[in-house]
Amino acid sequence: MSSPNRLAREKSPYLLQHAHNPVDWFPWGEEAFAKARAEDKPIFLSVGYSTCHWCHVMEHESFESTAIAAFLNEHFVSIKVDREERPDVDQVYMTFVQATTGHGGWPMSVWLTPELSPFVGGTYFPPTDMPGRPGFITVLRRIAELWKSERTQVEDKARSLLAALREAENQVTTAPGEWKVGKTLELGLSQYTRMFDSQEGGFGGAPKFPRPVNLQFLLHLAAQKNMPTQEADVTRSMALHTLRKMARGGMHDHLGGGFHRYSVDAEWHVPHFEKMLYDQAQLVQVYLSAYQISGDDFFATVARNILQYVGHDLTNSEGGFFSAEDADSLPTKDSVKKSEGAFYVWTRHEIGEVLGEDRVEEFCAVYGIEKEGNVSVSSDPHGELVGANVLIERLTLAEVAMRFQRDEENMKQRLYDDRAVLLAKRGLRPRPHLDDKILTAWNGLMIGAFARAGQVLGEASYLQAAQRAAIFIRDHLFDTKTGELQRSYRQGPSNIHGFAADYAFLISGLLDLYEADFNSSWLRWARQLQETLDLHFWDEQRGGYFSTTDRDPAILLRMKEDYDGAEPTPSSVAALNLWRLGQLLHNDAMLDRAHRTVTAFASRLEAQPFGIPLLLVAAALVETPALQLILHSADPVHPGLAALLLAARRKYLPCLIVIQIADKEARDFFAPYHPVVATLPDRPAESTAYLCENFTCRLPVTDPHELDRLISNLA
């Protein structure tokens, strides 16, 4: 092992993974930039994250090679960046790579001038030449020679490319013409319908990503009151069918809970095995919505399953949520080389040894276990899963009970016991690497997931988990004097200021938390964070939110994201937050800013509604008459209040905002915003519900059934 390099002083798990490479790595910062300028060398920028499989491969093949490291050290200044800590750096140079190569991914490899302008980019490079693909050392030699012999042309190219990227970025938000939200929603739905895989669920072929924003859009659309019944049924069916298929597939960890990153095939069977916090958070929200819409406990069970995984494996002692678990792990304790999926897969023989032959046939029938393994060659191009099985639910409980002539309850218990035994056995294997940094943005998503689970499923432990995480972020990553957030925490907070996503995602989580426990302190904090987000990230000229501030001169492009991918864009989430805050606080300025955020992206929405589905959800809400439900009680734990709340939470109603007035603190907070609050008696004889449409309230009701009827008629 080489002596430690500068990365040994960092906190990022990804940077620390490279701390003993022979490459003379620098973290992103002025020290590296100054060296490049002083020595007149180009910069080699390598961006990845700690649970990235191909990042590990390139490290082992190239960055651990003394010969390649020697060439890098002589001709380049090498910078290593954790994309999860510095999404701003990643976003700028990934945009360049995608624009110049037509694709992107990690590890990302980019060569920059000493002034940080990119001129060559790519992703993974093998160490030596392969058919149709140059090796890393070949690329390094070509670029080093180019820098010496054609320096002027290289710098001219870099400047022109950067200018083109700036011009393209200016077109992200353009002034809309005549724009009809309804037509754009129809166009978006038609795109989903054309792409829908009616057999396996999801949209398009392999590889298949969960992309929860797609499902959130469909469920929201299906819940709209003015949606024709037939279209609503089709829309709902696409989402529910996809969610069922995903949950029964191998992308779902049937033993330990949670979901892997994506499926390499079209039937959700063989996953890329890493587990990301942001996937778990968003999937919980979608499965909870599916449960509310369908009434099917299957969806609630999947949500609980994900939450159990996060609570057990991705939560620190103070309540913060870790970022991810790796795809790769050691097959055995004596192994020296990691392989993808080793922790999760089974041979038929291993399962038989654990369960015994009297139980193994039932289990194998349910989960598609085969003697020779159930992973096809096409799903395992590197031969890491030969003879292995990825658990995928091939039979329903009713089908397996019928096949083995058992009643369903008995069969259900047997399978539950079998999974528990296998999980305990799996726990003895070497675990995948845990990325234990705590990111503000992803914690915001997870706070929202736990909070909403607490209100929808009525389980106090979920609410407590959300509260603990929010307190952790407030205590460790928030500056009460400036109102600003830090990006991440690991062995203390980072020195990286929060990005737009950190604010938007945390505000969203706090709004969910308020509607779960009705503690107005979460609303106060959310309002303060929104003010900071508006101050540092809002584009007053064109509308929408930049991902970064303008305070870092090393970030050459100030960009707005316009694609709701694995994570939603800050502008999409911010538009939803502004609508919710505007309704909660009766604030027209917030509602107007929500509308401006949506219309800023109108041209993109018209051209590619499939690309920004969460912003389409916001567009629909902005155009929909809002419902405010004010619940008034003398006691926060009054049984009558609980019954009214249950009636309000039974259905999936994204247009419904709930406010609770059950103590003096809540009354004092809301009275300036909602005139009706000031007129309420201090201690009502019965818990009472006031249902308001656009802040005009109907006659109060105390009967939960009557409230349910009123909501159903209006929503």
Image: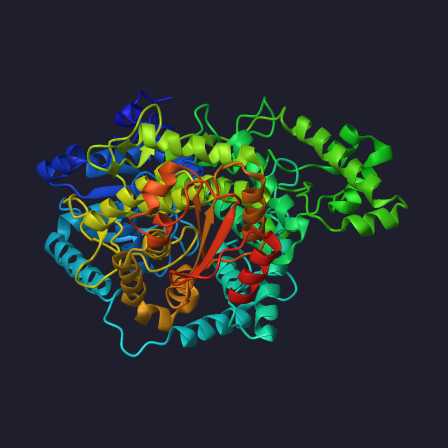
Quadrant of the snapshot with the N terminus: top left
Residue 86: image quadrant is: top left
Residue 272: image quadrant is: top right
Give the colouring mode of the picture.
Answer: rainbow
Of residues 567 and 528, the one nearer the viewer is 528
Of residues 82 and 302, the one nearer the viewer is 302
Looking at this rendering, what residue extends furthest in the right direction? 405
Residue 688 is left or right of residue 22, and the answer is right
Of residues 145 and 476, the one nearer the viewer is 476
Q: What is the x, y in percent for residue 419?
A: 71, 35
The mark tally for this picture is 0
Residue 64 is left or right of residue 116, and the answer is right
Q: Is residue 608 visible?
A: yes
Q: Is residue 128 visible?
A: no
For residue 508, above or below residue 664: below
Residue at 25% in and 30% down: 24
Looking at this rendering, what residue extends furthest in the bottom direction? 178
For residue 407, above or below residue 691: above
Residue at 65% in and 29% down: 426
Of residues 117 and 426, the one nearer the viewer is 426
Q: What is the x, y in percent for residue 234?
A: 60, 70
Residue 336 is left or right of residue 510, and the answer is right
Q: What is the x, y in percent for residue 662?
A: 44, 40
Q: What is the x, y in percent for residue 534?
A: 23, 50
Residue 578: image quadrant is: bottom left
